[in-house]
Image (cartoon, rainbow, N blue to C red):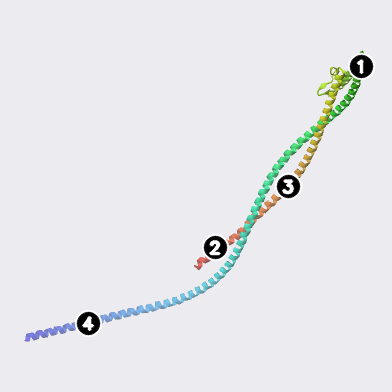
Amino acid sequence: MDDQTTEKEREKAEMEGGEKEKEEKEEKSEEEELEDLRAQILHLLLELEESRDTSQKHEENSTELQGLLEEERLASAHQAEAFTRQIQCLQAQLCSVQQEMEGAEQQKLELQEEVLTLQQAVEEYELETVTLRAEIAMKSQRRDEDRRREGDVEQLKKEFAILKSECETLKKVNSKLGERLQVLQRTSSSGVEVEEKEDGGIQTNIIGGSGSTCRLVDVCIQKNISFDGKPLTPTSLSSGFSDSLSLREQLKQAEERAEQLQRQCDGVRTELRELQNLFETSQKERDELELELLRCREELEKLTEERQFCTESAVLSLPFLGMIVIMAVLWCWWSELAS
């Protein structure tokens, strides 16, 4: 029993010692935890202080940033107002530029139409100049022909004078032949009467008639009178009636020749009149062509001056186009800033 009690006491003592140890351990652990907590609290207090400092700094920075933002906002507002004013001004300028562009486009169309009309006029004038040159060439040819005709006229005048003199000589010969024919007729009639009365006097009358015809032939030979290239010879007027017939034929040929020469003279005169009229008309046409050429030259000079004026106006419109390009660049820049 004592052993059991002692064992129980021992167990109790051990149990009490274990409990005390546990309590001591627990106290130690609690103290350590308190120290840890104190250390953590101190650390947290330090961090809190640091966070307060940083937050204060952040607040100061935020106030500074708010001031800067406010200043920037005000500056941007002023800048926006300035930009809006500039935009309104640019829009007004753009509207005016668009109106000027429309007017310039209209003026361009009008100038193009004028250029087309001028080109058509130039083509017409060139065609007229070509036709005038052709006409001038034809007129020069006609002038050469007129000169040749003038030479022909001079030749015809000479021929006319020759034919006239020949006609006069033929008229004289005709009159002389008529007189001789009358003489032959009288001699032939007297020879017939003598033949009826006296047979023996025929030979004397024939001899007398042949003598008169021989004298006529001698006169014609001395004057070198010919008809159609056939000279009058003594054998051609050998007897009375045959001589009178041949003289009548020659007289008729001379009259026909005279009429032919008269017709030739009339033809030459009419040709001379026609040539004179043609020369006068060609001279008038030449004067008209010279006036037309002067007018065409004046028109061409006017057209060249108008073309030079059109090119100068096109050169003057280049600065206007440059201003339009600058306006478009500014508008694009402002749209990028706004976006």
Query: Gap between marks 2 and 1, in whole Å?
Result: 144 Å
| Residue 313: % across, % down | 64, 57
Q: Which is more foreground, mark 4 or mark 1?
A: 1
- Say the numbered circle drawn on residue 26: 4
Front-most of residues 183 and 223:
183
The numbered mark, 4 or 2, whose residue comes first in the sequence reads 4
Q: Give amino acid for label 1.
A: Glu
Front-most of residues 325 and 19:
325
Q: Which residue is mark 1?
A: 196
Residue 266 in sight from this viewpoint: yes
The numbered mark, 3 or 1, whose residue comes first in the sequence reads 1
The residue tagged with tag 4: helix, strand or loop? helix
Q: Give amino acid for label 2.
A: Val
The numbered mark, 4 or 1, whose residue comes first in the sequence reads 4
Residue 224 in sight from this viewpoint: no
The numbered mark, 2 or 1, whose residue comes first in the sequence reads 1
Q: Which residue is mark 2?
A: 329
Query: Gap between marks 3 and 1, in whole Å?
Result: 90 Å
Is disc 2 in contact with disc 3, using a CB cutoff of under 8 Å?
A: no
Residue at (48%, 74%) from the top-left corner? 69
- Say the numbered circle drawn on residue 292: 3
The residue tagged with tag 2: helix, strand or loop? helix
Query: Gap between marks 4 and 2, in whole Å?
Result: 84 Å
Question: Would you call the spot at circle 3 few (<14 residues within 10 Å), some (14-19), or many (20 or more)?
Answer: some
